[in-house]
Amino acid sequence: MATDTAQSKKHQRALRGFTFIELLVVLAFIGILMSILLPWVQQAREAARRTQCKQNLAQIGLALQHYEIAHGWLPPGSVDPSRPILNVPRGYHVGWIVQLLPFMEEGNTWRNWDFQAGVYDPANRVTGEQRIRILRCPSFVEFDDSRVSTTYAGMHHDSETPIDSDNNGVLFLNSRIGFRDIIDGESHTIFVAETTGPRPARTWASGTNATLRNAGCPINVDLVVSPGIDPRTQSEDDKDLFVGGFGSIHQGGMHVLMGDGRVTFPDEHIDYEVYRRLANRRDEAEAGEY
C-alpha cells in the first residue's frame, strides 16, 4: 500500500505541468523575445518594400526609354487644349501614364481607353480605375490602399509653378521632349520620383498634380501652398494651379528615376540647389554631388 501511494504521488508530480508562476515567466520571456525581434522583422519588411519600390521605378524608366525610341520623344506630361493646367477634375487631362500603358505591359488597358473622351468622362471611368501594380509604392499601400491613385509623378519644373507648356522639366503640358533635348544629359536629369499620393485623390490617368510634381520645395517637405503665400489670402484659382513637390514615406529620402534609367535614393537633406538643377533639363549647370 505504501509503495502504491508513493508511486501515485510521483505520477501526480510528473503530470503536474507548469505552475502559474512558471507560466508567467515563460510568457514574459516570449514577450521580451518578440519585442527584440519585431523591429528586425519590420526593418526586413520595409527593406523588401523599398526594393520593390525601386524596381517599380526601374520598370517605369524602361517603359519611358522604349516610348522615346518608338516615337522620338517622351510622352507628354499632360495633353489638354487649355493652359495652364487646373488641378480640378474637368478637362481632357490625358496624362503621361496613359500614353505609357503599351510599354508597361498594359496593352489591354490601352486598347480600352477612349481617346475621344477626357480622363473624367464616364467612357473612361472603368478603364481609369484599373489597378496597375507598378504605380504604387508597397510601403504607401500599408497606409492607403486606394485603387486608382499612383505614388509616382513626373518632373514638370524646377520650381513651384503651374503645369504649362513652357516648363523646364521633361514631362509637362503638351510636351514633346526627346533625349536630344535634354541638354544637361539624362544621367543628370530627374524624370520621375515618389510622391505621398495625389492631391486631391484622382486617378493615375490624370495629367494634373496627381501625376506631375516639381522641385519647388525640398524632398519630403509637403507644402500645400506656394512658398511665401498666406493660405488665408490664397484665391481659388491659385489653389487650383498649385502643384506641389515630391516625397515618400521611406525614412530619410525618396527614390528618384534619372533619365538614364538609374534609380537613386537621394537624402532628404540634399543641397536644395543641387536638387533643383537635377529637375531642370536645360540649365547647363553642374549638378554637383547628390
Image: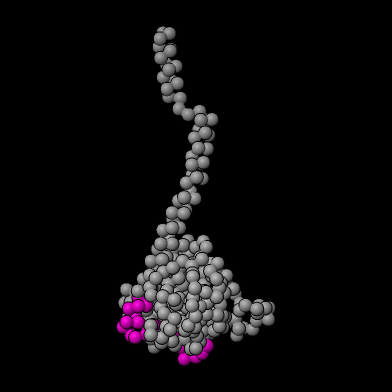
x, y (%) of residue 285? 49, 80
Q: Along the line of sight, which residue is nearer the eye, 68 or 262? A: 262
Q: Where 206 sits versus 142, above or below?
A: below
Residue at image coords 51%, 84%: 163
Tell whether position 83 is magenta: yes
Q: Quadrant of residue 107?
A: bottom left
In this figure, what is the number of numbered marks?
0
Residue at image coords 34%, 80%: 67
Whether residue 275 sits left or right of residue 74 in the image: it is right
Tell whether position 59 is magenta: no
x, y (%) of residue 243? 54, 79
Q: Along the line of sight, which residue is nearer the eye, 187 or 128? A: 187
Residue at image coords 43%, 84%: 183
x, y (%) of residue 250? 49, 63
Which span of residues is magenta-colored? 63-84
Question: Does residue 150 appear anywhere in the picture?
Answer: no
Image quarter of the N terminus? top left
Question: Does residue 269 appear anywhere in the picture?
Answer: yes
Q: Where 39 sits versus 25, above or below?
A: below
x, y (%) of residue 22? 51, 30
Q: What colour scheme has been applied to the protein in the rendered image?
A: one colour
The residue lying furthest to the bottom in this view is: 81
Residue at image coords 49%, 50%: 39
